[in-house]
Image: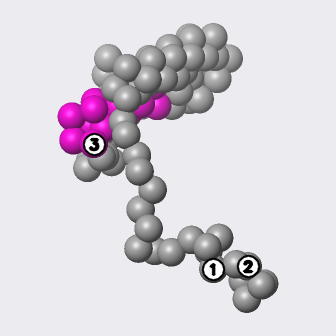
Amino acid sequence: MLLFVPTENVFKQTMIPEFRLRKIDLQRVALLDSRHLYAKAKRLFRTDTYTAKKDLVHGIRFLYFAIQLATRYKIVNFDEGNAEWRMVRENRL
């Protein structure tokens, strides 16, 4: 199939698309997602505590990852939030 695509339309590995991080948008999206997951966890806590705890920790992870993106322009530590998950899972809040 790629044989019939014009060469100017073929993505080359050497081409790197330009990406500019807009920190204000990152902040807005991270807070929005984190608040949504917190509200969802709060709503689910009485019926499904396991899912509620997972949503709570995912909201925290979103914030950790946003901080990494804002300061280092990449995520370098995907283990952020694991300690919080262990604490929440074991009810050590």
For the magenta stretch, what is the residue range?
57-73
Label 3 environment density (alpha carbons within 10 Å; few <14, some 14–19, many ≥20)? few
Using the numbered discs, state the Cα–Cα distance from disc 3 to disc 1 in whole angstroms.
32 Å
- How many numbered marks, from 0 up? 3
Give the residue at the far left of this rendering: 71
Residue 73: numbered disc: 3
Say which residue label 1 marks.
Answer: 7
Would you identify the image quadrant in which residue 5 lies? bottom right
Tell me if label 2 and label 1 are in contact, CB under 8 Å. Answer: yes
In magenta segment, residue 68: yes
Query: Where residue 7 sits: x, y (%)?
Result: 63, 80
In magenta segment, residue 20: no
Say which residue label 2 marks.
Answer: 5
**Quadrant holding the C terminus:** top left
User: In the image shown, does 19 or 87 lie closer to the viewer?
Assistant: 19
> Which of marks 3 and 2 precedes in the sequence?
2
Query: Where residue 59 sits: x, y (%)?
Result: 45, 25
Residue 47: numbered disc: none
Q: Of the residues shown, which amino acid type is indicated by label 1?
A: Thr
Using the numbered discs, state the Cα–Cα distance from disc 2 to disc 3 in whole angstroms.
34 Å
Q: 52 above or below 6?
A: above
Identify the secondary structure beneath mark 1. Answer: helix
Q: Main secondary structure of the magenta part?
A: helix
Q: Of the residues shown, which amino acid type is indicated by label 3?
A: Tyr
Q: Of the residues shown, which amino acid type is indicated by label 2?
A: Val
Label 2 environment density (alpha carbons within 10 Å; few <14, some 14–19, many ≥20)? few
